Image (cartoon, helix red, strand yellow):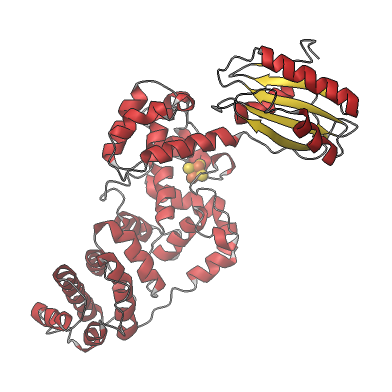
Amino acid sequence: MTAQSHFFQALREKAGPCLIQHPWTIAQINSSNINLLSRKNLAANLLERILPLFEVSEELTRFAGLQPLFEGINLLDPHYCRGDEALRMLGKCQGLNDFQREKLAGVVMLFMEIVKKTNLNSLQLKTFEILTLWWKIFQEHEVWVALQWLWQEGVTVPHSQNGFRAWWRFSHGSLPDSKNISESHPKIWIAICEEQTVFNSAFEADRMAAAFSGDGRYADLAGVCGDLPDCDNCELNAECLWYANEGNTAMVTIEEKIQRNQISAEDIPELMRWLLTSNPEEAEALQASLNRGAPLKDWSREGLRDLEKQQPLDSKLILRVEAMRELCKNYGIEKLKPQDQFSSSRDIFNHFHQQLSRKKQEQFIIVLLDNKHRYLAEEDVSKGILNKSLVHPREVFASAIEHRAAALICIHNHPSGDPEPSQEDLRITERLVEVGKLVGIPVLDHVIVGNESYTSFADQGLL
Ligand code: SF4
């Protein structure tokens, strides 16, 4: 048995019963009846699908500007149609440029050839010879789209790109190369499906692989071999080459590493390139910048200037880098909820570190607590160089009284990264502690957040 048949055999025996009985797959397979398609509908739907691919303005429709094309394509005789006839018909349309006319004339001629050869019989429409004509109509990178479209029109051709990917993973242990059109061409998949005897038809084999790869997820049919394969829970894993290769990371692409959950620290530069840009020039500039060594968290706005200078004015690369930094920074931040409790100054540092440690200005925050020292609210008191006028007891305690707080904790950051308290920090704290005693809302701690460390006034006995 070949590796490719093995996939279908295993699929049928191990994963098949529940997939076959699911209403989604039953409905899909039962749609495979032979029928004659309406030329008028098929032609109109084809033109609607193709026009955007040639960037024909949305304002041009079968009712406005393109009537000669939509009506004429039904009147042409497929046995005697010539290219100049098609061009004449398109010449009567308004708003098309020469390039669009020429391309659409090619589509019309190919469609006439298909009509002539098949009489739009749905069985003949999916032979290899005819599929090749469909793929010419849709252009090289649209070949899977062509199959999807045909299926929607009622031609039951195997068309699951995800099913193909699951099969490829299983029998090759890798992903098909999406940039290599001959490796990822659906004709491989159709041929494979047609060879399968364990299912009743190539279409049924395709639908089973589709369900297995997650295509039916909107119908509550969870497929294990989807974008992120759940190999540990897969009934096929004992025979799967992808699963067997899990430990072998040599020559594995970044996409495969993401899917295998194998991203390590060395992969971060490549992962960033993959995430941030598909433009080769941007990728090259980014690579050079990453090679200079600073990890993402150390890339300041200033540090990105060199990279920015190399980009065209309309490039969004720097913005995307900044967006990624923001995402990373905020990923670990969890909003405090009423009733949450801090049990030590370390808890306070852990919670505010992400939020404060990279601020370029000092920021003074108070956390208000109830009589059991549980979280009530959090308030920003000031931003900027801290001094007595910016952190006035009036601002701090007005908020505490408004929330009926029983105690509070002060937190602020040192943009220098050094958490050692300044003389001004000591004076401000002393004043707040005094006022706290007077109004009956004690200051329990003042934590200064540095780069990777902190100072707690309570721990240091400074309160
Ligand atoms: S073991 Fe993983 S990769 Fe292989 S078929 Fe199952 S889900 Fe897909």
Q: With 14 as the anchor, is 121 left or right in this view?
A: left
Q: Residue at x 56, y 33 (%)?
A: 329
**The quadrant where residue 63 appears:** bottom left
Q: Nearer the viewer, residue 357 or 29?
A: 357
Q: Residue at x 35, y 61 (%)?
A: 194
Can I make out residue 421 in this image?
no
Vertically, is 148 above or below 342? below
Q: Quadrant of the C terminus?
A: top right
**The quadrant where residue 76 appears:** bottom left
**The quadrant where residue 313 appears:** top left
Q: Residue at x 79, y 23 (%)?
A: 432
Residue found farthest to the top: 461
Vertically, is 106 above or below 352? below
Number of numbered discs overlaid on the protein picture? 0
Vertically, is 275 above or below 110? above
Residue found farthest to the front: 389
Q: Nearer the viewer, residue 158 or 96?
A: 96
Q: Residue at x 42, y 22 (%)?
A: 294
Task: Pinpoint residue 119: horizontal percent, then vertical percent.
Answer: 26, 82
Q: Nearer the viewer, residue 3 or 332?
A: 332
Q: With 17 as the anchor, is 462 left or right in this view?
A: right
Task: Pinpoint residue 438: horizontal percent, then vertical percent.
Answer: 90, 25
Q: With 389 as the anchor, is 327 left or right in this view?
A: left
Task: Pinpoint residue 91: horizontal percent, then vertical percent.
Answer: 14, 81
Task: Pinpoint residue 24: horizontal percent, then vertical percent.
Answer: 55, 66
Q: With 100 as the anchor, is 303 left or right in this view?
A: right
Can I make out residue 316 in this image?
yes
